[in-house]
Image (tube, rainbow, N blue to C red):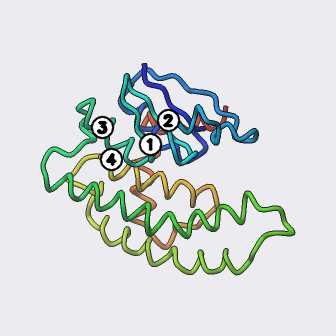
Amino acid sequence: MIKIYGSPRSSAGRCYWMLEELSLPYEVMPLDMRNKEHKSESYLQINPNGKVPALIDGDFVIWESMAITHYLAKKYQSPLAAQTPEEDGLIMQWSLWSLVDLQTPTVDWLIQEIFMPPEKKNPHVIEEAQKKIPGFLGVLEKSLQNKSYLVSDRFTVADLNVASVINILTALKYDLSSFPNVKRWMGLCSERPAMQRLQKLREA
């Protein structure tokens, strides 16, 4: 059985989402982050970065959440995976864009807003992050014009990976009303049964 390390509330969430999309059985491996179990010698044998997520599928070990979603879709021949080299390129394009560009200021804001004690919050970091986000959302907005999904006309790994970043903005109460295409597309993503199961896992 597949084993996954990391909470569904962390960046591992997109991996849980993919597992739920594929209806694959999996075992959640407990990892006490407060007691630094992710830095333990045993876990470093699985992910030498000492971070989550990590996934074990038989004898195969893989880490980095977006690499995991790509692997699972391809390994289990999901319709979410690319069907042509062109689709593969576009799925990689959007996945890397969401990780490198959109997620960077989003997580900067999240850390300050949620994880920093009030006396250590840096308003400048939040302000700078909030300045960058609309430009990235504008790119996504334009790309979703007259389209239901990012690649071809079906939900793919690209949508899952990008939507997982937008979900962080949703948690931060970001107003998407200026980006109607993004808001409509997120509605489609959020209606997926696998996404709704992920939400229940996060609330548990």
Question: CB atoms at circles 3 and 4 under 8 Å apart?
Answer: yes
Q: Residue at x 47, y 45 (%)?
A: 190
Pinpoint residue 89: horizontal percent, then vertical percent: 21, 57
In the image, which is nearer the foreground, mark 1 or mark 3? 1
Q: Which amino acid type corresponds to the residue marked 2 in the rendered image?
A: Ile
Mark carried by residue 157: 4
In the image, which is nearer the foreground, mark 2 or mark 4? 2
Q: Residue at x 39, y 56 (%)?
A: 185
Mark 4, residues whose alpha carbon is within 10 Å: few (<14), some, or many (≥20)? many
Mark carried by residue 46: 2
Q: Which amino acid type corresponds to the residue marked 4 in the rendered image?
A: Val
In the image, which is nearer the foreground, mark 2 or mark 3? 2
Cα distance in 3D space between marks 3 and 4 = 7 Å
Residue, disc 3: 73
Pinpoint residue 16: horizontal percent, then vertical percent: 48, 36
Q: SS for tag 1? A: strand
Mark carried by residue 63: 1
Question: CB atoms at circles 1 and 2 under 8 Å apart?
Answer: yes
Question: CB atoms at circles 2 and 4 under 8 Å apart?
Answer: no
Mark 2, residues whose alpha carbon is within 10 Å: few (<14), some, or many (≥20)? some
